[in-house]
């Protein structure tokens, strides 16, 4: 896959990548956001990997010249039927959560994030999930097909989306795939979310 005259490879993460992923996340969030130094994001990734919601085949790295320059993962995400939370066992969730997404600070704004997400969304579709949720910069995620979650009867309950509802988004994996699915995004299954 070519991104701005660079050939990147996007592949499932492996245990040997974990140290590089930690460094990548720290720089990405320290230099690219004003809300996190990355340590909470690393804790969330580790928590997801240790949970029943982890999907190893949907956790990816992007490489350029044998260097990890991007990381993102999708995990099962059961919706809550109430604003207060509670997810049941969630093992049969038809929706995945995209979080986190990190690009190495030396490669910001070079198309790597968009390339990662386009490929990842296709893999989620091929895996049979009905939708994807994400919380983040709507100006970026709208470019890869995400729309405000309330358009799909999926509502925020806490955190930044309450202040800016457009920051909580969803995407159908095919037209109409989220019809009949509704609920609330509650992160109570994760301490670090």
Image: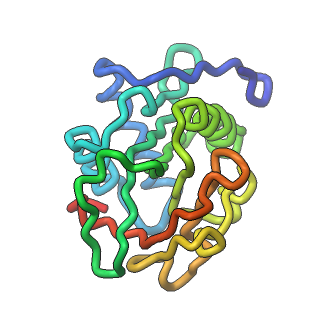
Q: Residue furthest bottom?
A: 163
155 shown above or below 92:
below
Q: Is residue 98 left or right of residue 149?
A: left
**Colour setting:** rainbow
Q: Residue 42: percent from the left, percent from the top?
A: 30, 47
Q: Residue 97 in the image: state x and y as whole percent.
A: 45, 52
Q: Position of residue 131 (x, y in %)?
A: 56, 51
Residue located at (39% from left, 44% from top): 75
Task: State the residue at coordinates (43%, 68%).
Answer: 35
Quarter of the rendering occupied by the N terminus: top right
* In this rendering, position of residue 111 left or right of residue 95: right
Residue 107 visible in rendering = no
Foreground of the two, 17 or 135: 135
**Compared with residue 84, is residue 24 higher up or lower down, i.e. above or below?**
above
Which of 80/123 is in front?
A: 80
Foreground of the two, 87 or 43 = 87
Indicate left or right for 140 with 66 as reference: right
Q: Quadrant of residue 148?
A: bottom right
178 to 164, vertically: above or below: above
Q: Residue drawn at (22%, 44%), measured in percent from left and top?
A: 51
125 above or below 29?
above
The residue sitting at the right extreme is: 5
Instruction: Please say whether residue 98 is visible from this viewpoint.
Output: yes
- Which residue sits at x=54%, y=36%? 128
Query: Residue 27 appears at what percent x and percent y?
Result: 43, 45
Task: Look at the image and tell me in which quarter the C terminus lies.
Answer: bottom left
- Looking at this view, name the residue that lies furthest to the front: 180
Q: Which residue sits furthest top? A: 66
Image-quadrant location for residue 22: top left
């Amino acid at each position: 896959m070519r991104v701005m005259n660079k050939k990147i490879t996007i592949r499932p993460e492996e245990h040997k990548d974990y140290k590089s992923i930690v460094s990548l996340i720290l720089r990405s969030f320290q230099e690219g956001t004003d809300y996190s130094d990355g340590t909470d994001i690393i804790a969330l990734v580790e928590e997801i990997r240790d949970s029943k919601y982890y999907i190893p085949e949907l956790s990816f790295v992007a490489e350029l010249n044998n260097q990890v320059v991007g990381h993102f993962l999708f995990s099962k995400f059961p919706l809550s039927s109430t604003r207060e939370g509670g997810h049941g066992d969630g093992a049969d969730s038809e929706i995945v959560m995209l979080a986190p997404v990190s690009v190495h600070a030396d490669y910001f704004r070079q198309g790597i994030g968009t390339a990662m997400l386009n490929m990842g969304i296709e893999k989620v579709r091929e895996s049979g999930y009905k939708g994807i949720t994400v919380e983040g910069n709507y100006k970026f995620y709208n470019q890869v097909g995400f729309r405000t979650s309330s358009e799909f009867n999926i509502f925020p309950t806490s955190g930044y989306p309450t202040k800016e509802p457009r920051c909580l988004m969803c995407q159908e994996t095919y037209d109409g795939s989220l019809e009949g699915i509704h609920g609330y995004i509650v992160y109570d299954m994760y301490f670090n979310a």
